[in-house]
Image (cartoon, rainbow, N blue to C red):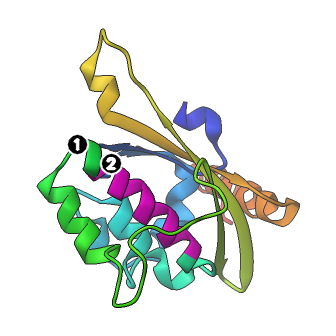
Amino acid sequence: MLRAHEPYPAIVFDRQWNIVLANRGVEPFFALVEPDLLRPPVNLLRLGLHPRGFARLIVNLGDVRAVFRNRIARQLAVAPDPALAAIYEELLAPGPGEPAEERVGADVVLPMIIRMDGRELRLFSTITTFGTPMDITLDEVAIESYYPADARTAAFFEEADSGSRGQRRGGSM
């Protein structure tokens, strides 16, 4: 599934939002974060919302934080987890005067605007969860898939993909 989604980013993560697998589409983003955030276990929430991670690149960070604040609060209400609660407190807990739950335009699709290398990339992501009474392990992973929201963003990923394929064959970018 991850390879089929390329050149666009896709990430598999566990119930604590630790990255289990990722495709090549995430490489341009991983290259822009502080190396200590990429030491295992790499946490998707920390990577995305930490000031030394993607947070400094996300133009609509307030909206993104609101979606994740609501999502993680609901997840913790259903299945309390000390490690996830610590990440919530570190990155998502409302500050003074901020509401604990915010109304956001969409909770199924997350629009995201990222500014990098002088470009403004417009993406949206969805999270797919798996569940079946036959296999508990599937209930513990989810896939976040990112899609381009405009032609310029699609071109960015297609260019990055063709460059990385040329590099793997011994070519240059």
Give the class, few, some or many, for how many residues have Cα within 10 Å of label 1's Cα (few <14, many ≥20). Answer: few
Q: Nearer the viewer, residue 19 or 63?
A: 63
Judge whether 84 appears above or below 58 on screen: above
Magenta stretch holds residue 36: no
Q: Quadrant of residue 35?
A: bottom left
Looking at the picture, does residue 53 appear above or below residue 150?
below
Say which quarter of the image contains residue 122: bottom right
Mark on residue 75?
2
Which quarter shows the N terminus?
top right
**Which residue sits at x=39%, y=22%?**
131
Q: Residue furthest bottom?
A: 96
Looking at numbered disc 1 in the image, what kind of residue is underneath it?
A: Ala
Q: Where is residue 100 shown, x and y percent of the image? A: 38, 72
SS assignment for the magenta stretch, majority: helix
| Mark pair 2, 1: CA separation | 6 Å
Q: Would residue 85 be found to the left or right of residue 105 on screen?
A: left
Q: Of 88 and 118, which appears nearest the observer?
A: 88
